[in-house]
């Protein structure tokens, strides 16, 4: 229960930083909200690979490594998008810093979720 509460708190703090980067009066640009798509897309390749991979082999698996590669590309894109927006002067650099801080917190929370709840072979919601 404590892990679930701390993961919820981490998600709320990360989304707060994202909203602050969008809604503060001196910034007032909502372009950084496109980062939400990356938050949704980032765990999908790894979840699909976990369902397809047979974990009896101790060596590396190409499917799991491809999923980690795709997830890494999604995470890097989430960090790159606010920087591109700031360089194109669509958003201010202060908003970019807030969004990057929110990205760090959210992706750490997603990683924490997989470390805490991803220990079982089958994906079960009953352990919550």
Image (cartoon, helix red, strand yellow):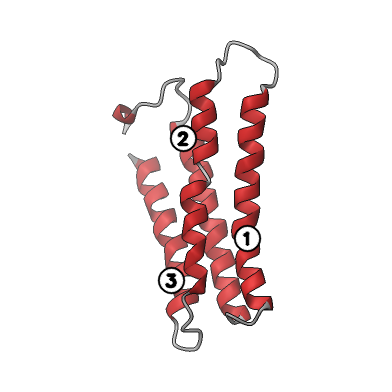
Task: Give the quarter of the image for residue 78.
Answer: bottom right
* Mark toward the start of the polypeptide (3 vs 1): 3
Q: Looking at the picture, does residue 94 appear above or below residue 33? A: below
Disc 2: which residue: 116
The residue sitting at 48% across, 80% down in the picture is 29
Instruction: From the image, tell me which residue sits under label 1.
Output: 79
> Do labels 2 and 3 touch, CB within 8 Å?
no
Q: Which residue is mark 3?
A: 19
Vertical order, 19 against 39 (above or below): below
Q: Is residue 73 above or below residue 22?
A: above
For this orientation, the residue located farthest to the bottom is: 26
- Where residue 53 sits in the image (x, y, percent)? 55, 20
Callouts 2 and 1 close, C-beta under 8 Å: no
Q: The residue tagged with tag 2: helix, strand or loop?
A: helix
x 40%, y 49%: residue: 6
Quadrant of the image for the C terminus? top left
Circle 3 Cα neighbour tier, 10 Å, few/some/many (<14 / 14–19 / ≥20): some
Who comes first in sequence, dot 2 or dot 3? 3
Tell whether label 1 touches label 3 (CB within 8 Å). no
Q: Residue furthest top?
A: 56
Give the alpha-carbon distance from disc 3 to disc 1, as whole Å: 16 Å
> Sequence-wise, which precedes: disc 2 or disc 1?
1
């Amino acid at each position: 229960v404590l892990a679930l509460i701390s993961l919820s708190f981490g998600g709320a703090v990360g989304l707060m930083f994202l909203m602050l980067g969008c809604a503060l009066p001196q910034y007032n640009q909502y372009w950084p909200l496109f980062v939400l798509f990356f938050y949704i897309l980032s765990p999908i390749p790894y979840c699909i690979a976990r369902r397809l991979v047979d974990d009896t082999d101790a060596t590396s698996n190409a499917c799991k490594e491809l999923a980690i590669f795709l997830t890494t590309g999604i995470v890097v894109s989430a960090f790159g998008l606010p920087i591109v927006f700031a360089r194109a002067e669509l958003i201010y650099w202060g908003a970019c810093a807030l969004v990057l801080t929110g990205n760090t917190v959210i992706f750490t929370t997603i990683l924490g979720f997989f470390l805490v709840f991803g220990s079982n072979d089958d994906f079960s919601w009953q352990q919550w």
